[in-house]
Image: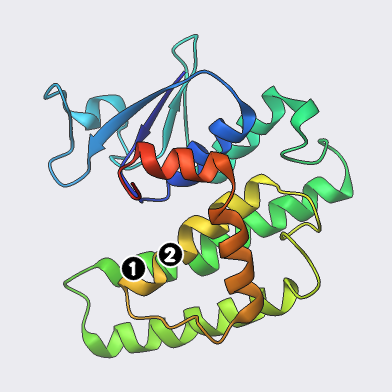
């Protein structure tokens, strides 16, 4: 498999999950500003959407959108318990989390990287994102991870998105449960390996 990624982007979530899963894969760096690969290939020719993540399977089929990719990876190694079994209420709870993170956190926080966005709009987006993160903080009370005491693919996604907050001026330091969660996640070997591979930590 190949994972097309950009350092620190939302593709970090499936990168972490692939390492948690122990699956063999090749990380492929995509330059999202130039929309090229390292060899000069036009990335739009690989992914018409032009963004990451993109997972290329061994048969050449390509899967996009992070929430779909992380569930696919989890389902390849059911014994690792990275996602609850399909058809269970717990699986729908996982999808509930993935959908919340992608729609309420990812888009809001990610949008703050746009240099063309007026500061007034950014202030509104920061306030909304912080309120959403405050709710997540409440949900993490008494829990190690979003789904309870066991890691799931949703945790990789939340960790990735929360990592952007300091870069866009959102202060999450008062959110103690979220802070404990990110510290716990940062200590996981798969997280450290993914971040080192992307040049985010030494």
Above/below status of 171 relative to 116 = below
Q: Quadrant of residue 169?
A: bottom left
Q: Which residue is mark 2?
A: 107
Near mark 2 (Cα within 10 A), the count class, few <14, some 14-19 or many ≥20, is some
Tell whether 200 sits left or right of 77.
left
Residues tagged 1 and 2 counted as in contact (Cβ below 8 A): yes
Residue shown at 77%/27% (left/top)?
78
Work out whether residue 58 or residue 19 is closer to the camera in this orientation and state it: 19
Q: Compared to 5, does 101 lie above or below?
A: below
Secondary structure type for disc 2:
helix
Residue receiving disc 1 = 111
Task: Reply above or below: 43 against 23.
Answer: below
Q: Position of residue 112 (x, y in %)?
A: 31, 72
Q: Secondary structure at mark 1?
A: helix
User: Which residue appears at 72% of the width and 60% of the height?
Assistant: 146
Q: Position of residue 52 (x, y in %)?
A: 36, 41
Image position, residue 175 (x, y; %) = 59, 82
At horizontal 75% and vertical 31% (from top left) the residue drawn is 80
Task: Indicate the position of residue 152 as horizontal and vertical percent values.
Answer: 70, 47
* Residue under the image location 55 percent in, 87 percent down: 174
Q: Residue furthest right?
A: 88
Image vertical order of residue 101 relative to residue 135, above or below: above
**Residue 133, label in figure:** none
CA–CA distance in space, label 1 to label 2 = 6 Å
Name, please, the residue furthest toward the top: 59
Q: Quadrant of residue 182?
A: bottom right
Q: How crowded is the residue under tag 1: few (<14 C-alpha within 10 Å), some, or many (20+)?
A: some
Q: Is residue 12 left or right of residue 99?
A: left
Left or right of 194 on screen, residue 70: right
């Amino acid at each position: 498999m190949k994972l097309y990624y950009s350092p620190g982007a939302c593709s970090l979530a499936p990168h972490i999950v692939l390492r948690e899963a122990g699956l063999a894969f090749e990380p492929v760096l995509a330059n999202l500003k130039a929309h090229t690969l390292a060899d000069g290939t036009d990335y739009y020719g690989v992914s018409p959407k032009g963004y990451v993540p993109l997972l290329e399977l061994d048969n050449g089929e390509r899967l996009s959108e992070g929430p779909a990719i992380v569930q696919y990876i989890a389902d390849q190694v059911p014994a690792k318990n990275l996602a609850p079994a399909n058809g269970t209420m717990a699986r729908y709870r996982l999808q509930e989390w993935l959908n919340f993170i992608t729609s309420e956190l990812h888009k809001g926080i990610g949008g703050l990287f746009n240099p063309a966005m007026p500061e007034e709009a950014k202030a509104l987006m920061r306030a909304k994102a912080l309120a959403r993160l405050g709710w997540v903080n409440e949900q993490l009370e008494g829990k190690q991870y979003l789904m309870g005491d066991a890691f799931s693919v949703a945790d990789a996604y939340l960790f990735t998105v929360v990592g952007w907050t300091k870069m866009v001026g959102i202060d999450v330091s008062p959110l103690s449960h979220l802070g404990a969660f990110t510290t716990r996640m940062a200590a996981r070997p798969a997280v450290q390996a993914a971040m080192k591979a992307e040049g985010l930590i030494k």
